[in-house]
């Protein structure tokens, strides 16, 4: 299993646990808010590099 697949599987497991313990809207805010906060902590050059890599993976 690749590193990204392990991360995705862990994220799904955490999401399911949060849905059981918390109301759905709190779990949704955590699932959306954590990656958004991590993106906002990047400096502009890191954000550009991340967007460039994401575009290459899409096939642009």
Image: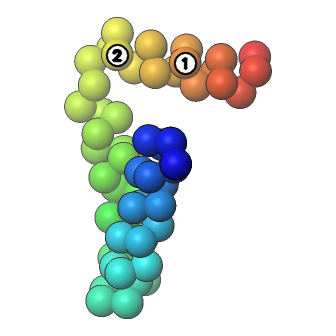
Residue 46 position in % (x across, y down) = 34, 16
Quarter of the C terminus within the rendering:
top right
- When asked about the image quadrant of residue 38, the answer is top left
Residue at mark 1: 53
Q: Nearer the viewer, residue 9 or 31?
A: 9
Taking the spot 55% from the left edge, 14% from the top edge, the residue there is 52
Residue 14 position in % (x across, y down) = 36, 70
- When asked about the image quadrant of residue 32, the answer is bottom left
Q: Vertically, is 6 above or below 31? A: above
Residue at mark 2: 46
Would you say residue 23 is visible in this rendering? no
Q: Vertically, is 23 above or below 6? A: below
Taking the spot 32% from the left edge, 64% from the top edge, the residue there is 30
Taking the spot 34% from the left edge, 34% from the top edge, the residue there is 39
- Element on which disc 2 rests: helix
Question: In the shown orientation, is residue 35 left or right of residue 53?
Answer: left
Residue 6 position in % (x across, y down) = 44, 52
- Element on which disc 1 rests: helix
């Amino acid at each position: 299993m690749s590193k990204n697949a392990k991360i995705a599987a862990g994220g799904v497991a955490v999401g399911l646990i949060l849905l059981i313990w918390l109301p759905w809207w709190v779990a949704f805010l955590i699932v959306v808010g954590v990656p958004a906060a991590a993106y906002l902590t990047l400096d502009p050059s890191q954000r550009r590099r991340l967007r460039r890599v994401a575009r290459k993976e899409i096939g642009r």
